[in-house]
Image (tube, grey):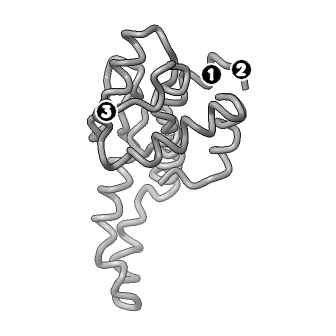
Amino acid sequence: MDYKEVVERLAPCGLDCSRCADYAGGEVQTLSNRLSKLLNGYHRVARVREGINPMYAGYSQFEEMLKTFAGAACSGCRGDNVLCPIECTAGECTREKGLDFCFQCEEFPCSKKIDPQIQKRWLDFNRRMKEIGAAEFCAEQNHKPRY
């Protein structure tokens, strides 16, 4: 994977936007669309199966969730349609400094406000990128769960 692709996939904080359930064109969206097509019309079968297994009573909720995943529209932190619920200063800060990732900054790790939800991961991810490189880090993350 070349560096340009890594920068497109990873946010400045190190989270892999491309593997997020809300990322437009990501694997979750692609697989959700495929599963929606494969299950087209299954609601009729689910109603029949509901008598055997009560779990199928919730099939319509599953369909709605699948529809939500299939409609993912976030561009990722570097794009124009950022829908991430995490408020992070890393994107703005790295843009201002002309950097791709926080670890590239001479002030890293800094005391700027990083959302508590990702602060530890931000620190761990950027330290790891600094150690092995962004491309190697990205490849490494592909083998780990996103969440």
**Amino acid residing under circle 3:** Cys
Q: Nearer the viewer, residue 105 or 20?
A: 105
Q: Which residue is mark 3?
A: 88
**Which secondary structure, mark 1?**
helix
Marks 3 and 1 sit apart, C-alpha to C-alpha, by 22 Å
Q: Categorize mark 3 by other alpha carbons within 10 Å: few (<14), some (14-19), many (20+).
A: many
**Which secondary structure, mark 2?**
loop
Instruction: Specify the quadrant of the image occupied by residue 48.
Output: bottom left
Task: Please tell me which residue is depicted at 35% across the width and 39% down the height of the picture.
Answer: 71
The answer to the question of whether label 2 and label 1 lie on touching residues, with beta carbons closer than 8 A, is: yes
Left/right placement of residue 86 relative to residue 66 reads: left
Instruction: Specify the quadrant of the image occupied by residue 8.
Output: top right
Residue 5 image label: 1
Marks 2 and 1 sit apart, C-alpha to C-alpha, by 6 Å
- Give above or below for 123 relative to 37: above
Residue 2 image label: 2
- Total residue callouts: 3
Task: Please tell me which residue is depicted at 53% across the width and 47% down the height of the picture.
Answer: 31
- Give above or below for 7 relative to 142: above
Sequence-first disc among 3 and 1: 1
Q: Nearer the viewer, residue 17 or 99?
A: 99
**Amino acid residing under circle 2:** Asp
Residue 95 x, y percent position in the rendering: 40, 12
Task: Please tell me which residue is depicted at 31% across the width and 30% down the height of the picture.
Answer: 112
**Amino acid residing under circle 1:** Glu
- Foreground label between 2 and 3: 3
Marks 2 and 3 sit apart, C-alpha to C-alpha, by 26 Å
